[in-house]
Image (cartoon, helix red, strand yellow):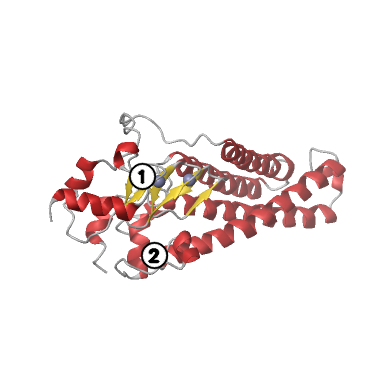
């Protein structure tokens, strides 16, 4: 079969848009340019997320810990809460500003298709919306306006898709938010116990009604986010271990990819080998390396 035949096959399979009808690919952006989705709803949600973390930090420090009697208790909890909150916000920023695995836009050109050296009968799929050749397990996201490799879902809270290259940061974000929510709830419980025994006036810089309102709001926020992020964290870890994205589970897609052990699937997302770097939003997993090791258990 000649290359021309193969291209025709591809066009028929991929459907309604011929490569010529695609806009030319945009000029390649430099390595310095940052990935950021300009979506009003997503940006609002991301700002709300940061605001809520800062609100929790404010109440924990200024309503509960600074007026507390024990300096050791305040120092320990203040440091722990602030470190976890910092890691949560850092994971959020990394999840938001990391390319989730976008397929180059407009690469469905005749030259590119020919360069793939397809075997006769082999089918490639072209995305009619962003004019790219869709690799296996990639899906088009209408918010990002791009095809994303191993797209799990588009999360407005991090204003980005969760895909192959930023899933680690997203999982860390849900984990740290769940941890600070749990920690805040524990501290609120302790605060109520201590302050009911003591005189309310000695137990805080704010007036008792203001203190109670601030604490109840924190309780509400903590409970809501603890449930939401803990469930999300569990779902994400399960989908990483079973190597099935959220979209694939929803669509009940047939598995066409190699099956690996659960531990190996974790390494593909978090990096190889297992280390403390798994918990750090600042360490980017070496995906090339993980690929080499992915069949070693
Ligand atoms: Zn697409
Ligand atoms: Zn998206």
Question: Measuring 30% from the left and 41% from the top, which residue is drawn there?
Answer: 19
Residue 166, labelled with which disc? none
Report the front residue among 83 and 214. 214
Residue placed under numbered mark 2 in the picture: 243
Closer mark to the observer between disc 1 and disc 2: 1
**Residue 289 at x, y percent in the picture:** 24, 53
Of the 4 image quadrants, the one containing the N terminus is bottom left
Identify the image quadrant of the C terminus. bottom left
Percent x, y for residue 56? 67, 44
Q: Cα distance, mark 1 to mark 2? A: 32 Å
Asked whether residue 275 appears in the rendered view, the answer is no
Which quadrant of the view contains residue 51? top right
Q: Which of 180 and 41 is in front in this view?
A: 41
Residue at image mark 1: 17
Q: What element carries label 2?
A: loop
Closer to the camera in the image, 195 or 49: 49
Count of numbered labels shown in the rendering = 2
């Amino acid at each position: 079969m000649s290359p021309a035949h193969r291209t025709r096959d591809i066009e028929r399979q991929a459907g309604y848009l011929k490569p010529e009808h695609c806009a030319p690919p945009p000029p390649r952006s430099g390595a310095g340019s940052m990935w950021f989705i300009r979506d009003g709803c997503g940006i609002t949600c991301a700002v709300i997320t940061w605001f809520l973390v800062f609100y929790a930090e404010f109440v924990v420090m200024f309503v509960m810990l600074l007026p507390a009697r024990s300096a050791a208790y305040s120092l320990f909890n203040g440091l722990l809460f602030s470190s976890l909150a910092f890691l949560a916000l850092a994971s959020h920023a990394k999840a938001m500003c990391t390319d989730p695995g976008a397929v180059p836009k407009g690469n469905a050109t005749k030259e590119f298709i020919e360069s793939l050296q397809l075997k006769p009968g082999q089918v490639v799929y072209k995305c009619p919306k962003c004019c790219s050749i869709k690799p296996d397990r990639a899906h088009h996201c209408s918010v990002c306006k791009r095809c994303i490799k191993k797209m799990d879902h588009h999360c407005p809270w991090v204003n980005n898709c969760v895909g192959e290259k930023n899933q680690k940061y997203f999982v860390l974000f849900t984990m740290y938010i769940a941890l600070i929510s749990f920690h805040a709830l524990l501290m609120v419980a302790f605060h109520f116990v201590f302050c009911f025994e003591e005189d309310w006036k000695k137990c805080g810089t704010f007036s008792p009604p203001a203190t109670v309102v601030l604490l109840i709001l924190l309780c509400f926020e903590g409970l809501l986010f603890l449930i939401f992020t803990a469930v999300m964290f569990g779902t994400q870890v399960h989908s990483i271990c079973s190597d099935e994205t959220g979209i694939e589970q929803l669509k009940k897609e047939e598995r066409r990819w190699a099956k690996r052990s659960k531990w190996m699937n974790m390494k593909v997302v978090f990096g190889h080998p297992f280390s403390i770097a798994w918990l750090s939003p600042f360490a980017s997993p070496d995906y090339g390396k993980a690929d080499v090791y992915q069949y070693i258990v």
